[in-house]
Amino acid sequence: MTDTLPTLSIIGGTGDLGTGLARRWAKAGYPLVIGSRTADKAIAAAEALAALATGPKPRGMANREAAAAGDIVVLTVPFAKAAAVIDDVKPVIAGKLFVDTTVPLVPPKVARVQLPPEGSAAVAAQARLGDGVRVVSAFHNVAAHKLEQIDLALDCDVLVFGDKAEDREHAIKLAEALGVRGLHAGPLANSAAAEAMTSVIIGINRTYKVDGASIRITGFGPKS
């Protein structure tokens, strides 16, 4: 099975979201390359995943080397660091699928929607990367600490945005490997909706003392 699965490079893979995604994808058998600002930190994170991996042993590298090694590059760094990391990996990811999980949270008012001038973090990423990289946007509204609990059933959907349906389909398969339903949610510009919703969810969590609210689209079944 592992021979047919793409290698995933998780850039910022030592952070909370990157760790949660990596744990579940390792268990699902995906070959993983963990990227971090320093190779030592990435190697340690990859070694911590070894016991969970049902496919090849995860590897750790500095961000640019990790991006070069994967078939699909997943960006999981905070918004404030995203532009610099994108510029760092851009020279080595031409022709690849780039999955952007970035949410434009601007401290200290992270419960307030503050989208960038481009309209969304994903559109800004596509502009920085140019036409040679295919950007899709996903995994904004899944609680990182719940992803890390790999035996926990996740009661949510993942909205996937991208200008080509075939590119979105790759991210939908990655969502399913996490144990959630992935849904086609339209072009990359629509990512603004999910990015903004993250701030709304943070506010709901605080107001109602919720341990990681998420979203679910109702009215149809998984195969509708």
Image (cartoon, rainbow, N blue to C red):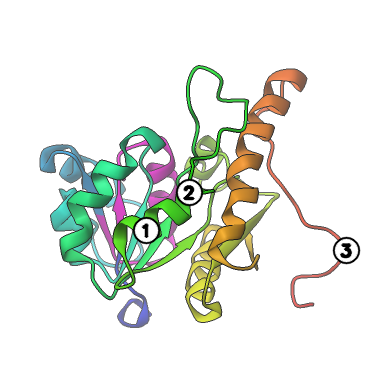
Image position of 119 (left or right of 22): right
Residue position for label 3: 219
* Residue at image mark 2: 118
Q: In the image, is residue 168 above or below residue 26? A: below
Q: Residue at x 74, y 19 (%)?
A: 207
Label 1 SS: helix
Residue shown at the point (16%, 45%) measured from the top left? 43
Q: Quick one: which residue is furthest to the right in this view? A: 219
The crowding category of the residue bearing disc 3, from other C-alpha atoms within 10 Å (few below 14, some 14 to 19, many at least 20), is: few
* Contact flag, marks 1 and 2 (Cβ < 8 Å): yes
**Location of the C terminus (image quadrant):** bottom right
* Circle 3: residue type: Gly
- Residue 65 in percent (x, y) is at 13, 57
Q: Which residues are magenta?
A: 9-33
Q: Nearer the viewer, residue 90 or 222?
A: 90
Q: Residue 7, percent across and down?
A: 29, 69
> Dot 1 corresponds to which residue?
127
Q: Which numbered mark, 3 or 2, is in the foreground of this view?
A: 2
Q: Is residue 65 above or below residue 223?
A: above
Residue at 63% over, 68% down: 186
Q: Is residue 23 magenta?
A: yes
Q: Of the residues under marks 3 and 2, which one precedes in the sequence? A: 2
Q: Does 191 appear in magenta?
A: no
Q: Residue at x 65, y 65 (%)?
A: 185
Amino acid tagged 2: Glu
Instruction: Let me know if residue 59 appears in the view.
Output: no
